Image: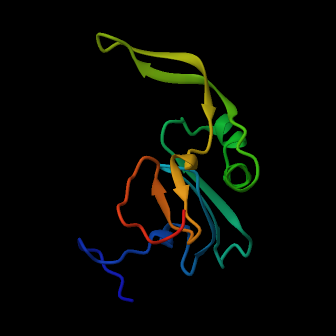
Amino acid sequence: MIIGEYPGDFTDEMGDFGSGTYIEEFVLGGAKKTAFSNFPPQIGRRTSNCNGKGRALNYETSKVVKFTTLNSMSLEDNTPLQVYNPEYTMRKHGGVVVSEHKTKEYKVAIEKCRLMKTFDSIPYGLVILNWTAEI
């Protein structure tokens, strides 16, 4: 595979973690909630990264929302977590920017899809006429 820097070319997204780094595990917790563990050969041990929209990533939240948490919520127990952010910055009406304390519920949102016996997933409410696979 050829890696390039132009639109349409493949890019090495793991290059920021060091040359030769590869993803060992990947977890999807819903739309824009991803986590992965990777192995950079330069370090010689596994590291992890967690991304998510709708939560502020700071030291306090990263202690609660991390790869192992998202992995266990996806595979075992989907109990929502309460994530406390002491300095949540938001814009109020009129363009005023304020910081306040905020607690937000963090949960996996995979249940918005139906898992088929063929391990395909389709959105709830989708009607397919003449569907041959078993649901």
For the point 72% across and 49% down, the residue is: 69
Quarter residue 67 falls in = bottom right
x%, y% of residue 72?
Answer: 74, 53
Quadrant occupied by the N terminus: bottom left
In the picture, measured across the screen, residue 73 lies left or right of residue 27, that is right
In this rendered view, identify the residue nearer to me: 115 or 43: 115
On-image quarter of the C terminus: bottom right
Nearer to the camera, 68 or 57? 68
Q: Where is residue 76 in the image (x, y as percent from the top left)?
A: 76, 53
Residue 43 x/y as whole percent: 69, 72
Residue 37 found in image quarter: bottom right
Of residues 127 and 93, the one drawn nearer to the viewer in this rendering: 127
Residue at x 74% of width, y 71% of height? 45
Counting from the top left corner in percent of width and height, residue 18 is at 55, 73
Q: Which residue lies most toward the front here?
A: 130
Q: In this view, does 91 lie to the left or right of 18?
A: left
> What residue is at 50 percent from the left and 61 percent from the top?
121
